[in-house]
Amino acid sequence: MQRYALINSENIVENIVSWDGVSGWTPPENMTCLNVEGIQCDIGSTYNGSIFIAPERTVIAQPTEPTREELLAQLNTLSAQIRALPEA
């Protein structure tokens, strides 16, 4: 079995499949099937006719630790809310 990329009409890799290349399997309609054995290629890559270009990765910023002042402000707000509650 070898790796094959299923490439849509916009030249984006939609799936990677294992196939022997000869058995009676037909790629889905409007898909190009290209042998990518030994080639760096992932779902979401763009094929420009000769190479695969990896998709842009979105970097998610890590939240920053709150400052002492921010924590004190939150504490004061919560303390005020607690003081406003009726006694049990």
Image: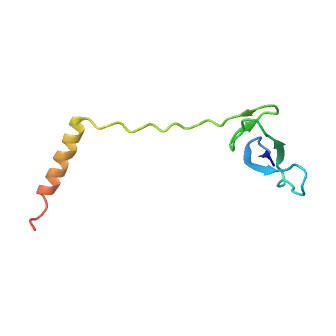
Q: Identify the residue at the far top of this view.
A: 50
The residue located at (42%, 38%) in the rendering is: 62
- Residue 5 x %, y %: 78, 45
- The image quarter in which residue 48 lies: top right
Q: Identify the residue at the far bottom of this view.
A: 88
**Nearer to me, 24 or 62:** 24
- Residue 76 x %, y %: 16, 46
Instruction: Tell me: 65 left or right of 9.
Output: left
- The image quarter in which residue 86 lies: bottom left
Scheme of image coloration: rainbow
The residue located at (77%, 40%) in the rendering is: 11
Instruction: Tell me: 75 left or right of 62.
Output: left
Instruction: Say above or below: 75 vs 81.
Output: above
Instruction: Say above or below: 61 vs 88.
Output: above
- The image quarter in which residue 58 lies: top right
Instruction: Tell me: 56 left or right of 83.
Output: right
- Residue 38 x %, y %: 77, 36
